[in-house]
Image: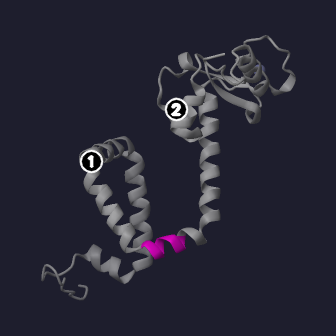
Amino acid sequence: MGKIIIDQYTNMDLSPKRKWQLRHPDQAKKLIKTSYKKYYLKNKEKLCKYQQKYYKENRGKILEKKEKYFLNNKDRIQQYNRMNINRKRKWEIKNRDKLRIEVIQLLGGKCANPYNIEHGGFMNDTRCLQIDHIYGGGNKEAKELGSRGILYKVLKDSNRKLKYQLLCANCNWIKKVINNENSKPLYKNS
Ligand SMILES: [Zn+2]
């Protein structure tokens, strides 16, 4: 029999599991983390759906709480952000690249080549591939959503191949010239 430890909240003897956790705090922390990760990966869809539903229903409350926390800890948060700006930036770049490659692969992974150009080796070089809005409106959407917003939109859109295509920088430029998208609009009076 192990030593009796009284729980301060329930006034009852702790379970053997909890006693073990108290005796091995580091190991217990690790174990809880890995088991939660396993649980999360197994129930990812369900948890995400629940989270989205909860956020939708309690948006005002959550934002209010967030703002209150920010105002109370403003100095601490700003100092932390200043010290970790490079780390944050690196993380952003890594995530953006990952997202971009995923979207490019969903759209076919190579230039749609509408002008039958001899491309050589760069037709599927992801570095010069751009996401083109087949029916225009790309500039407006870019202003509204930002580059990352567009990537997420394409990722979620199940009809993406009807609205978007991949063009290499050359084909994209030719399309812009043909559609007169590069020149300034004419003044109405002239
Ligand atoms: Zn091309």
Q: Is residue 75 magenta?
A: yes
Q: Looking at the image, can residue 151 be seen?
A: no
Which one is in front, 23 or 75?
Answer: 75
Q: Please, what secondary structure does the residue beneath circle 1 have?
A: helix
Image location of residue 163, percent across then percent down: 55, 19
Q: In this orientation, which residue lies closer to the viewer: 48 or 118? A: 118
**Residue 162 sits in quarter:** top right
Image quarter hosting the C terminus: top right
Instruction: Please identify the residue farthest to the bottom as the structure is shown.
Output: 3
Kindly state the secondary structure of the residue where label 2 is placed. Answer: helix
Magenta span includes 172: no
- Residue at 28 percent of width and 73 percent of height: 17
Q: Label 2 belongs to which residue?
A: 155
**Residue 60 as seen in the image, left or right of residue 106:** left
Judge by depth and name the residue closer to the eye, 70 or 109.
70
Residue 170, x across and y down, in percent: 79, 24
156 to the left or right of 132: left
Q: Is residue 35 above or below residue 54?
A: below
Q: Is residue 120 visible?
A: yes
77 vs 1: above or below:
above
Residue 125 relative to residue 150: left or right: right
Who's the residue at 73% across and 33% down the image? 126
Query: As shown in the figure, which amino acid type bears the numbered disc 1?
Result: Tyr
The magenta-colored residue range is 74-80
Is 83 positioned to the left or the right of 157 in the image?
right
Task: Give the total number of marks visible in the rendering.
Answer: 2
